[in-house]
Amino acid sequence: MPVTVKDLVEKVRLTVEFGEDELLEKEVTTSDISRPGLEMTGYFDYYSPERIQLMGMKEWSYLSKMSSHNRYQVLLKMFQPQTPAVIVARDLEIPTEMFEAAKKNQIAILSSRVATSRLSGELSSYLDSRLAERTSVHGVLMDIYGMGVLIQGDSGIGKSETALELVKRGHRLVADDRVDIYARDEMTLWGEPAEILRHLLEIRGVGIIDIMSLYGASAVKDSSPVQLNVYLENYDTGKQFDRLGNAAEEFMIDDVTIPRIRIPVKTGRNISVVIEAAAMNYRAKEMGFDATKTFENRLTQLIEKNGGQA
């Protein structure tokens, strides 16, 4: 997903010190942030000009001790055509030579009052999420008790109808039909809707409905972590379904795995309530309360008590 300097200004709350509209339309292609240190001494062998250049107190202090000519020459070499922008943190005073170098090589200068380390973290977090490669999967993503549950299954099995019932029970819709998922870090998957489908839900026989218009802003969410995968299957007497909750399955995207459970669907079964219970049970397990282990422990105690007979 392309990110421009203008997006950074709006999302990270930066101030434009120099830069026309065309400079703010420059694309940011990497989430890596550069804090130029060796470059200020003239060492450019491993310089990465395509990165956002972030100036903090250390960089500013070093620049202030240089002569005006040397300062201009270093900044001129640092600001390359592929450099998206330079950001000055801590509301530090911007040297005249920086404006001159930025004007010559057409680089936007931005500023922030935020401390450098914190600003670097905010920039990296935003760029990591926006620039991460998306994987589109078919399903419905719901926020159930604050936990992201990805509901999948064969076409026509009732995923959207189940999502509508969950919305009526007070939970929130994140995405229907197409869920764009990316790895936010090495342990976390994150999901969001395709922009054209945001807040919309398709119900066979009814058509497309706008959840936000019908149920209010509290019924939708723009994005969510993906923590549990529920796969709906048509009930078949020949299939074996997990009854104790110890048949572990996993759902993987970008080398990040989350648990998957399979739920049989048949007439008269309230799937939304079952999914709600599955989400609460998963959260309980994460907190150390495992009903399956409790049952197994009780069974073991009963067998021991009866001399080896259950």
Image: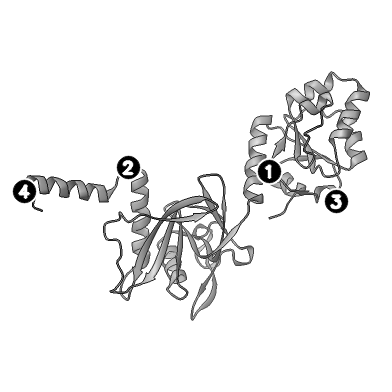
Q: List the residue tagged with mark 2.
A: 288
Q: Is label 2 or label 3 in front?
A: 2
Q: List the residue tagged with mark 4.
A: 306
Q: What residue type is labelled 4?
A: Asn
Q: List the residue tagged with mark 1.
A: 31
| 294 to 265, vertically: above or below | above
Q: Where is residue 140 in the image (x, y as percent from the top left)?
A: 49, 64
Mark 4 crowd level (few <14, some 14–19, many ≥20, 10 Å Cα): few
Whole-number angstrom distance, CA of label 1 to CA of label 4: 63 Å
Is tag 1's residue or tag 4's residue first in the polypeptide sequence? Answer: 1
Q: List the residue tagged with mark 3.
A: 22
Q: Is label 3 or label 4 in front?
A: 4
Is tag 2's residue or tag 1's residue first in the polypeptide sequence? Answer: 1
| The furthest residue to the top | 65
Is tag 1's residue or tag 3's residue first in the polypeptide sequence? Answer: 3
Whole-number angstrom distance, CA of label 2 to CA of label 1: 36 Å
- 100 or 242, which lies in front? 242
Mark 1 crowd level (few <14, some 14–19, many ≥20, 10 Å Cα): some
Helix, strand or loop under label 4: loop
In the displayed structure image, the side of residue 76 where residue 115 appears, left or right? left
Q: Is label 4 or label 2 in front?
A: 4
Is tag 3's residue or tag 4's residue first in the polypeptide sequence? Answer: 3
Q: Which amino acid does label 2 sit on?
A: Gly
In the displayed structure image, the side of residue 307 where residue 190 appears, left or right? right
Is tag 2's residue or tag 3's residue first in the polypeptide sequence? Answer: 3
Whole-number angstrom distance, CA of label 1 to CA of label 3: 21 Å
* Rendering quarter of residue 209: bottom right
Mark 2 crowd level (few <14, some 14–19, many ≥20, 10 Å Cα): few
Helix, strand or loop under label 2: loop
